Amino acid sequence: MNRSLAKTLSVVFHPLLLPTYLFAVILYYMPASTLTLPLRVRWIVLAMIFFTTFIIPAVAALAMVRLGYLDSMEMDRREQRGFPLLFTGVCYAATSYLFYREQAYDAVFYFVMGIIAASVFLAFAISQFWKISAHSIGMGGCLGLLLVLNKLAPDAMLIFPIAVAIFLTGAVMSARLALHAHTPAEVYAGFGSGLLLALASSVALQ
């Protein structure tokens, strides 16, 4: 894979953007009957998710770069990843709590957001001693959540999104390796931990 394509994939499928993509599938691909949230207001929910899971963490990371706490937005050094990941995890957990507190939202909202928040805290914990791939954790988690949702709601027919997710996961993992951002072990461990966390979460719904 050439470097420009690898860089593009890493940016387009940055971990901060994955919650927005996943909820776009939930809100607009799954049959309307599977959610009680009116279709006319779903774009507002998606915009809120984009703001709390991408805009706020990204602006915070940019501020850290400007203040000299981070070398760059890529956070290539393991030692600098801790606080940004912790802050992002708090943002995600707060979003999940908001979904849980407001009865207007279906249970799938806080369930999915809660698992995403847990994956960020997992990345934070592992990053204390190892530079695991956050991209791979995110892609593995998204794939796992799509598999769980397909099991819980077979009528949603998520086979196509799952197939796309499998392809994109492989592409993003290859991109991280092509950019020499991680070792193969860091990439594969990230994918495995994200996928297993999402699949294990289905036990809580039994």
Image (cartoon, helix red, strand yellow):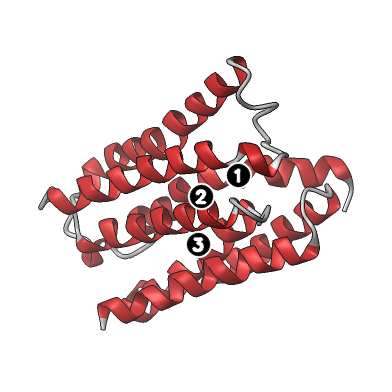
Circle 1 residue: 14
**SS state under label 2:** helix
Residue positioned 59% across, 51% down in the render:
128
| Residue situated in front as seen by the camera: 106 or 206 | 206
Q: Earlier in the sequence, mark 2 or mark 3?
A: 2
Look at the picture and state if 115 lies above or below 73: below
Residue 46 image position (x, y, % from top left)? 35, 42
Circle 1 SS class: loop
Answer left or right for 186 relative to 98. right
Q: Which of the image's four quarters has the C terminus? A: bottom left
Q: Could one spot residue 158 in this view of the protein?
A: no
The residues tagged by marks 2 and 3 sit, at their Cα atoms, a distance apart of 7 Å
Residues packed near mark 3 inside 10 Å, few (<14), some (14 to 19) or many (20 plus): many
Q: Residues within 10 Å of mark 2 (few under 14, many from 20)?
A: many
Residue situated in front as seen by the camera: 147 or 200? 200
Disc 2 and disc 1 in contact, CB within 8 angstroms: yes
At 41% from the left edge and 50% from the top edge, which residue is drawn?
24
**What distance separates the C-alpha of mark 2 from that of mark 1?**
7 Å
The residue at 77%/53% (across/down) is 182
- Whether residue 60 is visible here, answered yes or no, is yes
**CB atoms of marks 2 and 3 within 8 Å:** yes
Residue 78 locus on image (x, y percent): 67, 44
Residue type marked 3: Cys
User: Mark on residue 18?
Assistant: 2
Residue 41: image tag: none
Which residue does the numbered mark 3 point to in the structure image?
142
Question: The disc labelled 2 sits on which kind of residue?
Answer: Leu
Query: Is residue 8 toward the left or the right of residue 97 in the image?
Result: right
**Percent x, y of residue 104:** 12, 50
In the image, residue 5 sits, relative to residue 32, either above or below, namely above
